Image: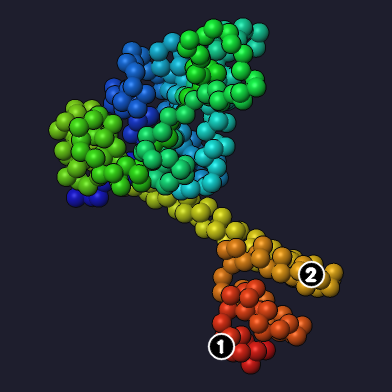
Amino acid sequence: MAIKLPLTNDYVFKRIFGQEDNKSALKDFLECILDVKIENIEINNPEIPKNYYDSKFGILDLKVTLNDGIIVDVEMQMQNQNNVEQRMPYYMASNYSNTIKEGDPYSECKKSIVISILNFNYYKRNEYHSIARMIFEKPKPEEVVNMGYEKEDKYATKYLEMHIIDLSKFKKKNPEMHTKIAQWLWLFIGSDEQMEKAGKLNKEIRKINKKLASMSLSNEERNNYEFRLKAIRDEADAMERATKEGFSQGIKQGIEQGIEQGIEKGIEKGIEKGLEKGKKQEKKEIAKKMLKRNTDIEDIIEILGLTKEEIEKIKKET
C-alpha cells in the first residue's frame, strides 16, 4: 500500500480541501478553529495554478467565503521563510480591501481572517493555537480621561483576525482527542493509527482520510506532490546559500574596510558582524589575513575564538 501523502504539503492540502465534494469537511475544520457556526461556505480559488511546482509564486493558499461575506484565507507553511508576521497582515489587509468595490461605503467591508498552519515555532507563545486581533494598548496614566465607561472597548476592530496553528507545539503537547481541533490536527501529523482513531471520532475526518488514501495511489498526484516538494526544498537551499554568502561577504567587507581605514577596531567590528553565523573555515581565512598583518596571536584568539594550537597550525600553513 502506498504511503499516504502528507496533508502538511500545501499542494496536497489544497488539492484535498479545494474539492467541491469536500466542502462539508472544510466547513467542519474551520468551525473548530474559528469557534463559530458556519452556515454557508464557498471556495473562491479551488484550482491549482499551472505554476504550482514553483514555490517562488508563493504558498498555495485556500480562500473561502463564509456567512455574511466573511473572507478566510488558509495557508499551509512548513518551511520557515521568516516572513510570517509580514505575510499574514498582507493577506488579511488585501482580502479586506477586496470585499468592497470602488465607490462602495466602508460599511460594506466584510471581516477578513487569515489562518496559518505552521510546522515551526515562530512566535514566543505558549499555545499551539494563537489568535491575534487589533487590541488597544494600556494607556499612559497622564493620558487617561474619566469618561465614565465601566467597560472599555478591547478591540480596535472586529474585522481583522489572525489564527496561527503551530503543529510543532501541538505535537509537543501531545493532547488526547477530546476536542475537535485536536482530532483534525492529528490527521495532519499523526501516525496511521492516530489518523484512523480521529476518523472514528469524526465522520468528516474519516472522509478526508479515505480521500487522502485514494489520492496517494495516483502516480500523477504523487508526481505533482514530488514536484512541489522539490521546488520548496530548492528554494530553502537557495535561501541558505544566499545567507551564507551574505555572511562571508560581510566578513570580507568588514576586513577590507578596516584595512583601508587602518583602524584595528574597524576590523574587529567587521569580523564580529560577519561571524554571527559564520563557519570555522571562514574564521581560519580571517586568521590568515590577520597573521599576514602581524596581528598579535592573543588578539586573534580573543576576536575569533580559535585556540592557540589552531592559530599555530594556520600560521604554519600560511
- Position of residue 213 relative to residue 111, above or below, is below
- Whole-percent x, y for residue 162 in the image: 47, 28
Q: Residue furthest bottom?
A: 316
SS for dot 1: helix
Residue at image point 36% right, 14% down: 40
- Whole-percent x, y for residue 303 in the image: 65, 73
Query: Cβ–Cβ below 8 Å for labels 1 and 2?
Result: no
- Position of residue 101 relative to residue 219, above or below, is above
**What is the quadrant of residue 140 in the picture?**
top right
Judging depth in this view, the residue of 49 and 285 nearest the camera is: 285
In this image, 240 relative to 19: left or right?
A: right
In this image, 276 relative to 253: left or right?
A: left
- Whole-percent x, y for residue 127 in the image: 37, 38
Residue at image point 47% right, 54% down: 233
Judging depth in this view, the residue of 93 and 230 nearest the camera is: 93
Q: Which mark is residue 309?
A: 1
The 10 Å Cα crowd at callout 1, few under 14, some 14 to 19, many 20 or more, is: few
The 10 Å Cα crowd at callout 2, few under 14, some 14 to 19, many 20 or more, is: some
Residue 85 showing in the rendered view: yes
Residue 227 showing in the rendered view: no
Query: Of the residues shown, which amino acid type is indicated by label 2?
Result: Gly
Residue at image point 52% right, 40% down: 84
SS for dot 2: helix
Judging depth in this view, the residue of 54 and 27 nearest the camera is: 27
Coloration of the structure image: rainbow
Residue at image point 20% right, 38% down: 176
Q: Kindly identify which residue carries mark 2.
A: 258
In this image, 291 relative to 284: left or right?
A: right
Of label 1 and label 2, which has the lower sequence position?
2
